[in-house]
Image (cartoon, grey):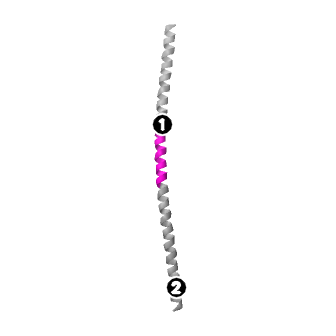
Amino acid sequence: MDEQLQQMEKRMNERFDRMEKMVADLIGVVGKTNAMVSDVKQEMSNMRSDIKGMEGAAALVDKRLDWQSAKIGQLEEKVAVK
């Protein structure tokens, strides 16, 4: 009977060891996933900043284009008058 109890205890300890390793592995996976999510969030934040900068630059280009179009229109009027 003692031998059977020892075998049961051994099997239980082996199972607990496996469960402990699985939990440790899972904690590692969660930690790596959290780090990757953090990196992605930072990249998204950087992209948003870049996009805002590009939007500002595009707005400036639009204003310059409008100004140049107006100037061309004025020049065309002057040429047409002569």
Amino acid at pointer 1: Val
Mark 1 lies on a secondary structure that is: helix
Distance Cα–Cα, label 2 vs label 1: 68 Å
List x then y, in percent, for residue 82: 51, 92
List x then y, in percent, for residue 67: 50, 76
**Is 36 inside the magenta-drawn segment?**
yes
Residue toward you, 60 or 29: 60
Residue located at (52% from left, 79% from top): 70
Disc 1 crowd, CA 10 A, few/some/many (<14, 14-19, 20+): few
Q: Earlier in the sequence, mark 2 or mark 1?
A: 1
Residue toward you, 80 or 70: 70
Give the farthest residue toward the bottom.
82
Disc 2 crowd, CA 10 A, few/some/many (<14, 14-19, 20+): few
Image: 19 above or below 52: above
On residue 29, which mark appears?
A: 1
Residue located at (49% from left, 37% from top): 30
Mark 2 lies on a secondary structure that is: helix
* Magenta-colored span: 28-46
Residue located at (47% from left, 51% from top): 43
Amino acid at pointer 2: Glu
List x then y, in percent, for residue 57: 47, 66
On residue 51, which mark appears?
A: none
Residue toward you, 5 or 30: 30
**Residue receiving disc 2:** 76
List x then y, in percent, for residue 40: 48, 48
